[in-house]
Amino acid sequence: MRVGLMLPSGADAAEVPALAAQAEELGYDLVASGEHVLFGSPTSNAFVALAAAAATTSRVGLLSAVTLLPLYPPALAAKMAATLDRIAGGRFELGVGVGGENPDEFAACGVPVSARGRRMDEALPVVRAYLAGDAVPVDGRPTRLDPLPTGPVPVWVGGRSEAAMRRAGRAGEVWMPYLCSPDRVERGLRLANDVAAEQGRGPVTGGLLAWSAVADTRAEARTLAVETLQRIYGQDMSGIVDACVPHGTPDEVVARFREYADAGAEQILFGPLCAEGDHETAIRGVAEAL
């Protein structure tokens, strides 16, 4: 089981280098950053945040979780991914998702939110081709990325819908859902691999963005999970917390991670749901329990 740490979405971008260095020191395998252009709370750009993280780390993988690919011209996304991979010495992994939680950010970028799935499906093969050094036709002329990444850049496809599962099968190395049960991970990964086999591709591995609440007791952690997810998503999540959100003491959270790993999610991103001031205690506790 490979365990990564999600950088706090609300952290000041200036704090990223220190947070990433701490994650590496604690033994996490990955440091991940999400992104939004406009959202209900402060959120960084993943490429920029991870470039800062690369400067203070040398071992951990760096994952965008996720880059909102429909908001980027494919060539620009590929260029930024290749540049970041070179800065990081080959440690970058590209996570992509369709977004859509906040239609205003799509409008602000001049992209119809209704077109996000189509734009994602069109962009993914183009980004992969550029990153592989293949020629991509533009107005009838071949174009190539220069410089290329230092090596293959794994693509994680985020999302828990059937469309995301199929997209991972067509164009991803990893399928990464969120807020789902181990059973759903197992079923979704089976579908992603069925699609991959139909396409003549290799197997898709499982990932998980695991929002997780850590506290002294399971009851305290459950309350924390419900309240924090309410702030993040603006809706009541109490009905899915028990099945879909690891919560409890660090040992209980890690035990739940292992259930997801047994279901096929071999790569877990720990997204701490913490009371204010408790972030370091939570990430240290989970690291020690691994």
Image (spheres, grey):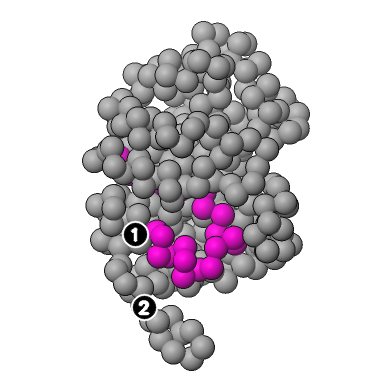
Question: Residue reaching furthest front?
Answer: 14
Q: Is residue 286 in view from this perspective?
A: no
**Amino acid found under the numbered disc labelled 1:** Thr
Left or right: 249 with respect to 119?
left
At x 28%, y 57%, the residue is 86
Question: Residue reaching furthest top?
Answer: 216
Q: Is residue 52 in view from this perspective?
A: yes
Quadrant of the rendering where the N terminus is positioned: top left
Label 2: how many residues lie within 10 Å, few (<14), some (14-19) or many (20+)? some
Q: Is residue 173 above or below residue 20?
A: below
Q: Nearer the viewer, residue 141 or 202?
A: 141
Q: Is residue 75 magenta?
A: yes
Q: Is residue 85 above or below residue 24?
A: below
Q: Nearer the viewer, residue 270 or 202?
A: 270
Q: Which mark is residue 144?
A: 2
Secondary structure, mark 2, is loop
**Amino acid found under the numbered disc labelled 2:** Arg
Q: What percent of the width, then of the height, locates residue 286?
A: 41, 21
Magenta span of residues: 60-81
At x 60%, y 49%, the residue is 37
At x 27%, y 27%, the residue is 25
Asked whether the beta carbons under mark 2 and mark 1 sit within 8 Å of each other, the answer is no
Left or right: 67 with respect to 226?
left
**Reading the chain from its start, which is encountered first: label 2 or label 1?**
1
Q: What percent of the width, then of the height, locates residue 265?
A: 46, 41
Q: Which mark is residue 83?
A: 1
Q: Which mark is residue 38?
A: none
Spatial CA span between label 2 and label 1: 14 Å
Quadrant of the rendering where the C terminus is positioned: top left
Q: What percent of the width, then of the height, locates residue 30?
A: 36, 39
At x 46%, y 70%, the residue is 75
